[in-house]
Amino acid sequence: MSKAVKIAVVSTIVVGIGVATFFIVKNIRKKMGLKKGQSLKELKEAEEQKAKEEEVKANTPSKPKEPEYDPTADAKELHRTMAGAGTYDDAFWRLSNRLTSAQKSMVKGKFNATYGNLKDWIEGDFSWSAEDRALKSWGY
């Protein structure tokens, strides 16, 4: 074999080894989760940071999920504040002020279905500015 052929064969082998090494390293980096241009040190730091964040998250007490709201008891209490002679103003306003808008809508629906129109009850129990304020509080 001539010297030129030997050089060509050796060059081909070296290039082949280089290409194979490139793809092997690329596959290893991919399996390790290394991004392009990222070093092993950076990967290790990122994994440590992620582990710390997960530990903090695991040790942080989560807020318990609030139970579904049932408007029945509040509709009954609202009725009690206006039933009979007179109105229990303090109880009415305590109830009105502690409920959210969504809860008030649910209570209003339950009240209307059980006791009659809430608006009529408010108009019958309050007068003047207190009536206006009560109606506004309940979305009328």
Image (cartoon, rainbow, N blue to C red):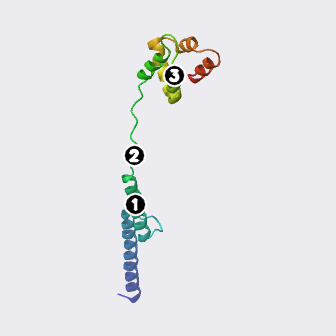
State the CA–CA distance, disc 3 to disc 2: 34 Å
- From the image, state whether disc 1 or disc 3 is nearer to you: 3
Q: Are marks 3 and 2 in contact (CB under 8 Å)?
A: no
Q: For the residue carrying disc 2, how many other residues have a C-alpha within 10 Å: few (<14), some (14-19), or many (20+)?
A: few
Image x and y of residue 54, in percent: 39, 56
- Depth check: 80 or 114 in front? 80
- Check residue 92 in the rendering and tell me which mark sits there, or answer none: 3
Alpha carbon separation for disc pair 2 and 1: 17 Å
The secondary structure type at the circle numbered 1 is helix
**What's the mark number on residue 62?**
2
Q: Residue at x 40, y 63 (%)?
A: 47
The amino acid marked with disc number 3 is: Phe
**Sequence-earlier tag: 3 or 2:** 2
- Where residue 130 sits in the image (x, y, percent)? 61, 19
Q: Is residue 58 above or below residue 34?
A: above
- Give the SS element for disc 2: loop
Residue 104 is situated, as x and y percent measured from the top left of the image, at 51, 24
For this orientation, the residue located farthest to the right is 129
| Crowd rating for badge 1 (residues with CA inside 10 Å; few <14, some 14–19, many 20+) | few
Whichever of callouts 1 and 3 sits on the residue coming sooner in the sequence is: 1
**Left or right: 137 in relation to 83:** right
Left or right, residue 34 beside residue 121: left
Count of numbered labels shown in the rendering: 3
Q: Quadrant of residue 32?
A: bottom left
Q: Is residue 80 above or below residue 101?
A: above
Locate the N terminus and report the quarter of the image it occupies. Answer: bottom left
Res 140 visible: no
On the rendered image, what quadrant is the C terminus found in?
Answer: top right
Q: Which mark is residue 52?
A: 1
**Circle number at residue 30:** none
- Residue at screen point 48% across, 14% down: 112
